[in-house]
Image (spheres, rainbow, N blue to C red):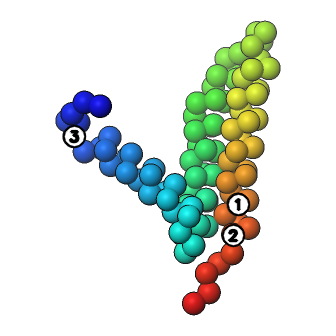
Amino acid sequence: MGAVSDGTCVCRRNHSGARGIGLFVRPTIRIAAAFSGIMLLLLTAFFYVPIFALEIHTELAVEGLNYVGDTLLFATTALLAGFGADVARD
């Protein structure tokens, strides 16, 4: 780990850790799970769908489809975990 010239990298790292910890804190389970699922969905759209589109007519098309399908399944699991979490009633 080297020195960081600006605070953006450290800030992003701290927020992602906070979302992970948020999955263990009862009042923030839904928000953290929903945000994790949305981030996985966006990452799939911006990274894996273009890979799949470029590989569609090659022998690597199945691998590209696997990337998209697996990541969408993980995103769906995170979103459903958020919807299924109990709401803290005070």
Q: Quadrant of the C terminus?
A: bottom right
Q: Residue at x 55, y 75 (%)?
A: 27
Looking at the image, do the residues carrying marks 2 and 1 touch, with CB atoms under 8 Å apart? Answer: yes
Looking at the image, do the residues carrying marks 2 and 3 touch, with CB atoms under 8 Å apart? Answer: no
Whether residue 67 is visible here, answered yes or no, is yes
Q: Residues within 10 Å of mark 3 (few under 14, many from 20)?
A: few
Which residue is disc 2 drawn over? 85
Q: Quadrant of the N terminus?
A: top left
Mark 2 vs mark 1, CA separation in Å: 6 Å
Q: Which three-letter amino acid code belongs to the residue tagged 1?
A: Ala
* Element type where label 3 sits in the image: loop
- Reply above or below: 21 against 14: below
Q: Residue at x 73, y 67 (%)?
A: 84
Q: Nearer the viewer, mark 2 or mark 3?
A: 2
Q: Which three-letter amino acid code belongs to the residue tagged 3?
A: Asp
Mark 2 vs mark 3, CA separation in Å: 37 Å
* Element type where label 2 sits in the image: loop
Which residue is disc 1 drawn over? 81
